[in-house]
Amino acid sequence: MLDEIQKRILEEVADLHTVPSGAYNIRANGKMEARNTTANIDIISKEDGSGIDIHVKPGTKNESLHIPVVLSQSGLKETVYNDFYIGEDCDVFIVAGCGIDNCGNQDSQHDGIHRFFVGKNSRVKYVEKHYGAGNGQGKRILNPGTEVHLEENSTMEMEMVQIKGVDSTIRDTKAELAAGAKLVVRERLMTHGAQKAVSNYEVALNGQDASADVVSRSVARDQSYQKFDSRITGNAPCSGHTECDAIIMDQARILAIPQLEANDLDAALIHEAAIGKIAGDQIIKLMTLGLTEEEAEEQIVNGFLK
């Protein structure tokens, strides 16, 4: 059974207050805590115990899958491999994510490697949230790796969120798109203290009319560091857009590297990057409504990251 700390983490990373409906696999401190499969979604443990295989039957519509991970044991370090096989003509909602509550002096680390194989004409909405808490000296380290293979006319929407408490993260995301496939990524990130966050995206548009839209919004506070490195390669008549929009505060540092590579005459690719501080007139306007300067900053940051 999950303890109170683990339940609180579960709420943060998966918005779960009770056992979810549909298929789920809940992992706690390196072990499977609970699992449920459905007629259309099967979850199988890998033989070596390093993760799970998820099989979604062709034609599955309006079903959900939750696969959160919680760590509350200081010093635990693990690497988990999860493979998703999505059949043709599916429409599914997948919620992943990891939360670490570290109250000890040893570092805790979870590296989750997810591979998606999405069949023709299927649609996947994927939400991944990362969260850290605990008053120990040990670090909370999360390194997610995501590999996406989209077959013809398939779509994947990815929401990648990290707002609080993670000391170090390296997020590696790679995607390959066939003809007519579509990838949409929305990253929301905030760092504070001495935290470090690196986001690497590599997207290959290999088929005609494939498209990708990779957008990151982030806030860096205190002495934290962020790096956003996004590369879109057009190998066919396609369209791609990548954007980094960041607010920098205090003594933080941000490096944005948007990259484009066109290998086809009809590859239409765009990149944008903007880094700046909060405008003084925005703060003054909110202060005239009765907010303190600190409250005004929080309102602006929260609105920016929504």
Image: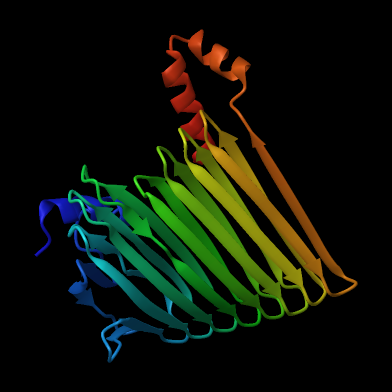
Q: Is residue 12 visible?
A: yes
Expressed as whole percent of the image width and height from the top left, the position of residue 47 reads 28, 92
Residue 65 in which image quadrant:
bottom left
Expressed as whole percent of the image width and height from the top left, the position of residue 139 reads 30, 52
Left or right: 185 with respect to 63?
right
Residue positioned most to the right:
265
Residue nearest the viewer, comparing 124 with 11: 11
Left or right: 266 with respect to 213?
right
Q: Quadrant of the N terminus?
A: bottom left
Residue 278 in which image quadrant:
top right
Residue at point 40% right, 37% down? 193
Left or right: 73 with respect to 261?
left
Is 33 above or below relative to 179?
Answer: above
Expressed as whole percent of the image width and height from the top left, the position of residue 116 reads 49, 78
Residue nearest the viewer, comparing 36 with 200: 200
Residue at point 25% right, 64% down? 20
Residue at point 59% right, 19% down? 282
Q: How many marks?
A: 0
Left or right: 21 with respect to 285?
left
Is 97 above or below relative to 165?
Answer: below
Is 265 above or below relative to 189?
Answer: below
Residue positioned most to the bottom:
47
Q: Is residue 16 visible?
A: no
Residue nearest the viewer, comparing 299 with 174: 174
Expressed as whole percent of the image width and height from the top left, the position of residue 62 reads 42, 70
Residue at point 38% right, 64% down? 95
